[in-house]
Image (cartoon, helix red, strand yellow):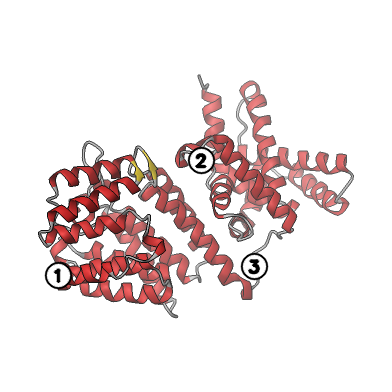
Amino acid sequence: MATDTQRTIEAVWRIESLRLITGLSRIVRDVGLAEDLAQDALVAALKRWPQSGVPDNPGAWLMTTAKRRGIDLIRRRKMLERKHEQLSHEGEQQHAMSPLEAASALDDEIGDDTLRLLFVACHPVIPTEARVAFTLRMLGGLTTAEIARAFLVPESTIAQRIVRAKRTLAEANVPFEVPQVEDRGARLASVLEVIYFIFNEGYSATSGDEWMRPELCQDALRLGRILSEIAPGEAEAHGLVALMELQASRLPARVDSSGQPVLLLDQNRARWDQLLIRRGLAALERAEKLGGLAGPYRVQASISACHARARTPANTDWSRIATLYEDLARLLPSPIVQLNRAVAIGMISGPAIALELVDALSAEPALENYYLFPSVRADLLTKLGRIGEARAELERAAALTQNVRERTLLLSRTTACVNKSPKVQ
């Protein structure tokens, strides 16, 4: 059973780990080593603080301890003499400073360091799944066990992904820096991709017993907000934040009292979080004011804004949504985007026209195992009164999904086959 001191240490780590790792990464220029040093400092705190008490400034204590361990490690390895001298010099300054002065000095560069760490943790040289785990560990402050629980994989798998990410960064000699202007676009796209991947896994879990994992949505939102604050000139960063805020506003209404999924057009909009909607619309406005061509996250945020502004499903501006999906298809050519566009057109022109558009996508390999494709067909077939065909499509969709709640919903609709609304999430 955890003691009060242990719980305090856990809370301190949650608050200080990002600042600690980013500060150490700036000094040692090695994210993996920085994380190891931070963990060593945490272990030292777990051993010492229960006897000595929690220091007045625990963050400064952890930083000082980590720097000293870094000096010892470098000395033992007889390498990186220049960094050793730099660490020694900064360690002496840290020792001479009061804890509050040390924390203040670290705060001066924390924004830049966090941005650097984001770009390093999300570097395209790392496989996507490893990028996600590494980012949650480095910037989300989650433990390996917490990440494993969130993604329903063994803890050893997450640990291996994190180790591989560190090794890959070291072997590729990835510098601890924000990329140059000419490389920033591609690297920013990788950062945004990782953050949105985390959010989507929380918003609609791909597998497991729960339809949503709100804690992952919150982690992604926090990372997105950090990015938009320290890179205020990046329109797509604001676009992604807007998209996540607006989608997260629906979370309270996406399940009923028994935890069963509730689709968008069936949700009680009074339960939508109005604060998140206001934040999302404000972020979208910031993205639009930066000008330039709208990127995919800004376009998707605009689609979500159409739903957020509609007091009832009947008031939804489906014409605007269909146009936005056309814009999105030009930016991200994808049969999934075309499938969503077909749903929007069906809301304007009727299910028969929508079904023609959907059936035209049937040969797309990307939709072969995509459970929402037969689900959408089932909705349209139901509206057209073709109940037997709709039931078969719902059974196919249920067989494709790996999420227990989603499968239960689809099978219940298979039995009743009375849902009259296209599947929009």
As drawn, which residue projects farthest toward the left? 385
Sequence order check: which comes first, mark 1 or mark 2?
2
Coordinates of residue 86 in the picture (x, y in percent): 81, 52
Residue type beneath disc 2: Ile
| Comparing labels 3 and 2, the label whose residue is closer to the camera | 2
Instruction: Give the label, 1 or 2, closer to the camera.
Output: 1
Any mark on residue 350, and which? 1
Residue at (59% x, 54% y) in the render: 127
Instruction: Give how far across and how far down residue 150 sits, in percent.
Output: 45, 40
Residue 272, visible in the rendered structure? yes
Disc number for residue 147: 2
Give the answer, above or below, for where 180 lies relative to 96. below
Q: Is residue 342 left or right of residue 421?
A: right
> Residue 41: x, y in percent?
68, 36
- Check disc 3 and give the amino acid type: Pro
- Closer to the chain start, of discs 1 and 3, is 3
Residue 276 in view of the camera: no
Q: Is residue 209 above or below residue 314?
A: above
Residue behind mark 3: 179
Q: Is residue 66 left or right of residue 304?
A: right
Q: Quadrant of the C terminus?
A: bottom left
